[in-house]
Amino acid sequence: MKVSEDKNSCIANQGFAIDPDCRPGAGHDPDDQLRLNGPSAALGPNGGNEYIQIAAPSMGREEWLALGRPLADGWLTQGPRVKEFEAAFAARHQVARALGVSSCTTALHLALAALGLAPGDRVIVPSFTWVATANAVEYCGARPVFCDSGLDGYNIDPEGFRRTAARLAAEKTPAVAAIVVHLFGLTADMEPIMAVAREYGLKIIEDAACASGAGYRGRPAGGLADVGCFSFHPRKIITTGEGGMCTTDNEALAARMACLRSHGAGWSEERRHLADQPYLMSDFDELGYNYRLTDLQGALGLVQLARLDGFIAERRSWALWYQRELAGLVWLKTPSAPEGFEHSWQSFVTFVRPGLAPAGRDEIMARLHQGGVGCRAGTHAIHQLGYYRRKYGLKEADFPNAALLAAQTLALPLHNQMTPNDYQRVVDALKSL
Ligand SMILES: Cc1ncc(COP(=O)(O)O)c(C=O)c1O
């Protein structure tokens, strides 16, 4: 299926009037789900459809139609659809305010900037997470102080977090904030973390890049601390191509983030355009950024958000199936959600037990890939990455769990484009190793 060609010819020939019958895949799929092979499908050793992607976006007719509306009315940058998406996202995540931004990385930077982070400030972050979590701290000239993760849920270990906060306070360089990551869709254990935050006066940012729709003790991610930051990158559960969201219950913080998101302007572009005197320009009191989400992304996000709970329910049932089917493989530990944690199953990240596995983790990944099964390391340990290692003189042994998880985790395909046969093939491939 040549999706991009179909899209282009639709738009060019119809002058922005999207013809629903001109959608990619029309007539091929009875449940109206576009089966996008994904841009990297051809990279699989078996080529084309046989390769099971590690992740793939789920796009349907509604998304296709939604994109046509901003194209037709010409409002393309942040505008009414972003506003609608923000309101729906805030309602789903039970927060007072949600602000669409261009990525989770910019969401994290915006949150830290709005909290008033100053150069040299210490911010505690886990080492075992995507590099963007720490990069956002560096953008502010502040200093990330790494913390180890637990081997079970892969998230920041609350006891280690307490020790790190206590050590920094004792050294008279107290942390002012922490970024707590809900890795792969499982929320961190927020109650003990918030107790440490209260004790040491830390602001807490939830890196909820992987956690749209996840929950903790009955409350959605994104409303568990001072600010939540989400990602809509295509590897996430819902996507807008690139994109992100900041969430908060703090109106003053939301207003500051809204201002910094759009160059530090006192008025939004939307308000200026809708005002009686649109020719007047706002004042710019702050050094801001252009971190806006477009209305094309807002339109897409609204449709994807409406499908979020269905996506999670399907993923959950296959995650449980994987747990059952893989239970006999003693060398492979499968992930699970403790009581009270609602996993959103953005990724299904297993742990290859050293010494018991038929081969090393990287060799297992090579064999799965050769057999047509996409797989990845869970993520990396930031303290081992060149920039951080050199800048802060860090060693592998400084955060042993993060180093072990970076070396031994194995993410298996789990997404809403997979068929029962795909899941069976993943399990068969693992059992035949
Ligand atoms: C934990 C975590 N934080 C932040 C990010 C950055 O998200 P984005 O790609 O939207 O900037 C990612 C992306 O994968 C992530 O996994």
Image: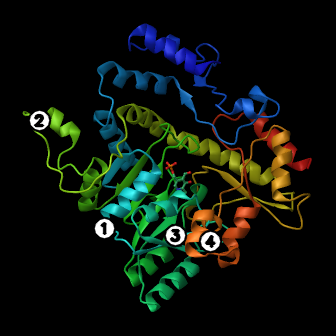
Q: Amino acid at mark 1?
A: Gly
Give the spatial CA distance, label 2 vs label 1: 31 Å
Q: Position of residue 314 (x, y in %)?
A: 62, 41
Please give the residue where the numbered disc 3 appears in the rendered image.
Answer: 125
Q: Position of residue 62 (x, y in %)?
A: 47, 25
For marks 4 and 2 on the same chain, the one whose residue lies earlier in the sequence: 4
Give the spatial CA distance, label 4 vs label 2: 50 Å
For marks 3 and 4 on the same chain, the one whose residue lies earlier in the sequence: 3
Numbered mark located on residue 116 in the image: 1
From the viewer's perspective, is the residue at label 4 or at label 1 nearer?
1
Give the spatial CA distance, label 2 vs label 3: 43 Å
Please give the residue where the numbered disc 2 appears in the rendered image.
Answer: 275
Q: Amino acid at mark 3?
A: Val
Please give the residue where the numbered disc 4 appears in the rendered image.
Answer: 149
Mark 1, ligand 1, within 8 Å: the answer is: no
Residue located farthest toward the left when viewing the structure as drawn: 276
Q: Nearer the viewer, residue 228 or 2?
A: 2
Q: Amino acid at mark 2?
A: Ala
Q: Quadrant of the N terminus?
A: top right
The reply to whether callout 2 and callout 1 are in contact (CB within 8 Å) is: no
Give the spatial CA distance, label 3 vs label 4: 10 Å
Q: Nearer the viewer, residue 330 or 143?
A: 143
Left or right: residue 340 versus residue 264 is right
Left or right: residue 245 versus residue 261 is right
Q: Nearer the viewer, residue 93 or 288?
A: 288
